Image (cartoon, rainbow, N blue to C red):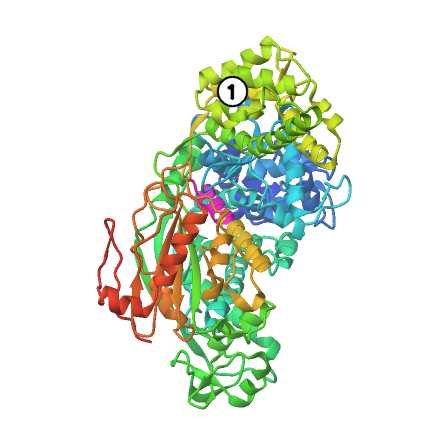
Amino acid sequence: MPRGERLRLRDFVKGLGYDPDDLIVADRLSHLVDFKRRKEFVEALRTDGDFPEGLETSVNGLACDDGGKGHEDLLARYFCSKLKERSGEEIAKLIADSVPVVVYLHDVFKGVSMQGGGEGSVAKALKRAYGIYDRVASIAEEAPELIQVKENHKKDKYPASVVSAIFQDVKELFPSNGLKDKLKELNRWVSTRLRSEKPAPAAEAPTIDETTALSLLYMPQRSWFTGSDVQVIAHMRGALYVYLLKGGAKLIRLKNPFFDPTTLKDIRGATEILKVFSFHLSREVFSRMRVREDLLEDVYALRNKRPELATPFVFYTTLESLYLLLPGEVEVETLVEKALDDTLREVLEPFAEGGEEDNEEEVEVSYEVLGEMKLDLSQTTVCEAAKQVNEFFGRVDVPERSFAFTVSYEPVLRTSRELCDKCKVRYAIEEDVLSELDWLHVRGQLLGRKERLCNVCLAVRLAWVRSGESTGRSLDELGEDVVTLVMKIDPHVPKGAKVDFARSVEAKVAEEASSIAKELSELVDGWTSEWERRTKSETSERFKLGTLSPGEFLHQLKATLGGEASERDVDELAKVVDCRKNVWDRTKLAFALYGLKTIRRLDAWGGEEVGELLGKVLNLYKQLNQSRRTTEGSKVPWFEELVRMICDKVETELRVQDSVDRRLAQMVEFYLLSTDLVNRLGKSIDRADWMVLVPPSVFSSVTVLAVRHAAIRKLLEALTPLRLDPLLEYDKPPIVTFLVRMRPEVPIRNVWNLVSGGGIPYCRGCAIALLPLYVGRGVMGVRERVLLSEWTEDSIRDALKIVDELSEEHYLVRSRFRTEPELDGAVLATGRLLK
């Protein structure tokens, strides 16, 4: 090109191998420039105009030179690893071809490296592509008080933390020296949770493996409050959803075409095949968006172990439905038909022999459009865009339109002319084919013969085989008296919710300190008793935590340990007591340990018991005395930072926004809570006494377990770690737990109809409502709900009594078939339910 001649944009686009008249191409290529210049880019391409200088230089200047260890550097190296040729043009084409993937995967390595990095040219180019969507999603999550506030101005004053998205209490607290150390602490915590040390590779190409995917469920999106409750994987989806809404998108509720539970095999199979169906839906959407699928190879390879990473367009699922956010141009009917056919083929083809059937069968499908939106980012601020996104996902409770249609598929396994015994609509597979699968125990007995099943119903049963568990299990194994636990979450944040994070921090410090205080008290009592025994005399001043003022406590503690309390120490304690009167009762020992210089004198007493306690005390002491360098250059103990945060009101009462990311984060936390529950049951109850009906799954709203009635106490004890009193004032509990007492021969469909029928009792301020139900052979009953403020021995005893009263005889004799018992202002309909 002659010197001084400006770049003709259409020629440049043709040189990259694209059609300059393709509107999708124009939009994708515009992501190579800064967001503010994209409209200008598209207009120049449309009018065959020139483009300002710099584009060609920036493209040719792209080089795979990102050698840092931050997550943005890792992302750049991951993208470069997919290239055969690493020229600037090839890098630019890779980004342009895969903008939706770039946006979705932008934080995929943040779970293994919280540090950003991103100084290389490819990292900067990727950030130009995803930056605006990342920013809108981040603002949608963040407290309005912190939006547009620089990290080093105010946010750096908060301790790094991990906060519960459901309960908003501080689960982990990391006092540290500045932002860099806080990020290191978070990296270390995630590695501990994963039981894996996964260093960020310095030179070799990173991979998206199982550890990487699992880390996204634990690592918070940011280190400060109203960001540390949102996991990275939730934010990744949020950024993708902003991108979809920018182009125009629709949120739909699709009825699960595989859900028709009659037996345990059906409900478990429907759970497993839903994961397969969700994967094929998402893969087909990516395909229709014309992206480079080689960038998703690692993600797709993890689909069985970590399916949540491979199904981003499935917002979340119940057993009955899938909520999907789809590009506006995607036709739902053809999308579902393709995904359903791919699902059946994947599940059934391993068992097929010979050629395919040449006939077609149909499946009825229905869906509802919950909302549609096109977000114009060029005509609004990022704050206003974030508000619009939150409003869109917050008002989709009422369907706008409903649709029903049929999709066709070619049966994979040969069919007969007999109808399927389960669906009674489609033709059953030939008996000789079905009999070859009897070793998998997928068929029950019916009128003296084996069930006849069609391709769809058999695929549901065979999907259970894919889970790795024996399909021969039955509820009959649990005896004549079974208790089923159904946990459901309705993710949401109360309108106008606020949390005082200063109190939350105090509570967390108090939690850590209280156990040390108890042990220390016991040891000191033991020391004084030993002193009395040795000296034959009584100690005039016994060390007792509960009877002293703050100043007296500090003097007594130091005197007991051989030290002296300075006036400054007492003044610091007084500062805390004055600014918040109830702090002293909850965090007495933690604050008293501040400034304790002679703590190591404890070691003189010797013994393993003292040594173990000493480690705990020293750890807390270290945390409370952590120092960081302030902007003025002086060092300030972390304890003083905490005092300042509590007393000086550094924006500790923050609003919690009801964002899509936070709702997704609640789903992730529900999965982690349910998984912990299953693990605790596995350790406390014999395998023969319980089973999982619907296993925990990320972005699934339901978990179902069943136990023998004799094991109900252990089930209730396994629930005790659940927090019941949230810091958010919920109008209705986000988690409802049903305890259903039943006979094993009762169809599982009856149980599901009962717990999914609505009528959840009003429970203001509760995080979890416990509802006892009974499903019998000819009647079902509802016991008055139990709302527990804490799990204690008394509450467990009360719950056991209620479960014991859940019986058919109790309702026949005591309730006299009452159909509408009043439940504290909420009516939960009951009635006769025949098998």
- The x and y percentages for residue 412 are 54, 79
Q: Is mark 1 on a helix, strand or loop?
A: loop
146 in the magenta segment: no
Q: Can residue 763 be seen in this view?
A: yes
Question: Which segment did they paint magenta?
Answer: 659-669
- The x and y percentages for residue 21 are 51, 48
- The x and y percentages for residue 713 are 47, 58
660 in the magenta segment: yes
- Report the predominant secondary structure element of the magenta stretch: helix
Q: How crowded is mark 1: few (under 14 residues within 10 Å), some or many (20 or more)?
A: few
In the rendered image, which quarter is residue 678 located in?
Answer: bottom right
Relative to residue 321, is residue 811 drawn left or right?
left
Above/below status of 606 relative to 232 = above
Above/below status of 341 relative to 3 = below
Residue nearest the viewer, comparing 421 with 353:
421
Q: How many numbered circles are shown?
A: 1
The three-letter amino acid code for the residue at tag 1 is Leu
Residue closest to the far front: 536
In the rendered image, which quarter is residue 107 located in?
Answer: top right
The quarter in which the C terminus is drawn is bottom left
Relative to residue 711, is residue 596 drawn left or right?
right
Q: Can residue 22 be seen in this view?
A: no
Residue nearest the viewer, comparing 55 with 729:
729
Above/below status of 608 relative to 653 = below
Residue closest to the far right: 203
The quarter in which the N terminus is drawn is top right
Tag 1 residue = 548
Residue nearest the viewer, comparing 739 with 154:
739
